[in-house]
Amino acid sequence: MTECDVCLVGNLIVDNTHCVSNFVSGQSNNSLSHDVSVGSVANVLRALHELQPELKVGVCSSIADDVNGKYVIQWLSDFEKKTKTLNTNIYCDSGSHTSSAVIVSDITQNIRSSIVNWGACSQMKNFETPSSSWIHIMYGDKLDNLNADVLKSLKSGATLSMDFCLNKHSVEKIHKINGMLSYIDYAILSIDEAQSIAQEARGDVAAKKIGTLVSKCAIIHSPKRIYISDGNETTTLDTEYIKDKRMNVLGAGDMFAAAMIAQTLKSSDIVKNAQFAHQHTTQKLMESYEKEI
């Protein structure tokens, strides 16, 4: 019997987020709202609990013994007390700092920009996880010590998925990612991430190229379309695109990944699961904006 239904591995970060309207570079911009929160892994954790409260979820990451690290630990402790469904393997790196970011989310243009101070989670060395039915690697392109051997050790009996965060990758980074993808069942990427990793401009071509490398399929999401490919067959879905709605798009990729995982635990219909994930994410982003502003 597994200890967890899902285990989240990787990026654990403290986000300082400012919402603005029509951000102008080089000028002082008014902050409509400000929030400090635990992001990335925590975003997926929150979304999974909302979608399926009964899921037992593990978290494996690294922090430092600093103010942000203490904030992360307190948040995880509060979440565990509230839900009774959390299993954590959090390692303290005394020689680093807890990752943090300053984020500007433009709710008029529906875009976000960030300055990230990468720290302990990107340098994590211990990938020991509780036994799980599904293991999701977060920001696989920013985990310096993640490699094919680590993924091979995690793979035993579990479904393995991975998402990414960088829009540009070096040749060396692409080579490393390609070497890891054969151990991944589902690669979940934004269109920009996929285009960079596949070195292809077209979304369907990028999906096919990445789908050829993974065990099951690549799922590429964007505001207007989703591409799904197992390397042989590629499906393109035109999605509802809400251009005239204001949204805080922070965490959109995390919400999409969480919804994909939650649905795929219940159903093997990847196309319908991706449609649900996009609709759910769009709705939650609009609700988030309405609460904040």
Image (cartoon, grey):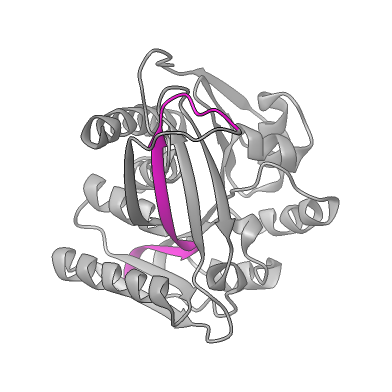
Question: How many tags in the picture?
Answer: 0
Relative horizontal placement of residue 258, taking residue 49 as reference (left or right): right
Image point (53%, 21%), residue name = 225
**Magenta-colored span:** 1-25
Q: Nearer the viewer, residue 131 or 105?
A: 105
Q: In the image, residue 259 lies at what x, y percent?
A: 36, 41
In the displayed image of the protein, which residue is found farthest to the bottom?
94
Q: In the image, residue 145 lies at what x, y percent?
A: 66, 72
In the displayed image of the protein, which residue is found farthest to the right?
171
**Does the magenta portion include 49?**
no
Q: In the image, residue 255 lies at what x, y percent?
A: 38, 42
- 265 is higher (above) or lower (below) than 233: below
Image point (57%, 75%), residue name = 124
- 77 is higher (above) or lower (below) than 109: below
In the displayed image of the protein, which residue is found farthest to the left?
82
Image point (63%, 59%), residue name = 142
Relative horizontal placement of residue 274, taking residue 206 as reference (left or right): left
**Does the magenta portion include 20?**
yes
Q: Quadrant location of residue 291?
A: top left
Q: Main secondary structure of the magenta part?
A: strand
Image point (55%, 32%), residue name = 27
Relative horizontal placement of residue 191, taking residue 109 as reference (left or right): right
Residue 158 in sight in this render: no
- 32 is higher (above) or lower (below) than 21: below
Q: Nearer the viewer, residue 34 or 71?
A: 34
Q: In the image, residue 74 lies at what x, y percent?
A: 27, 73
Position of the N terminus by quadrant:
bottom left
Q: Nearer the viewer, residue 91 or 137?
A: 91
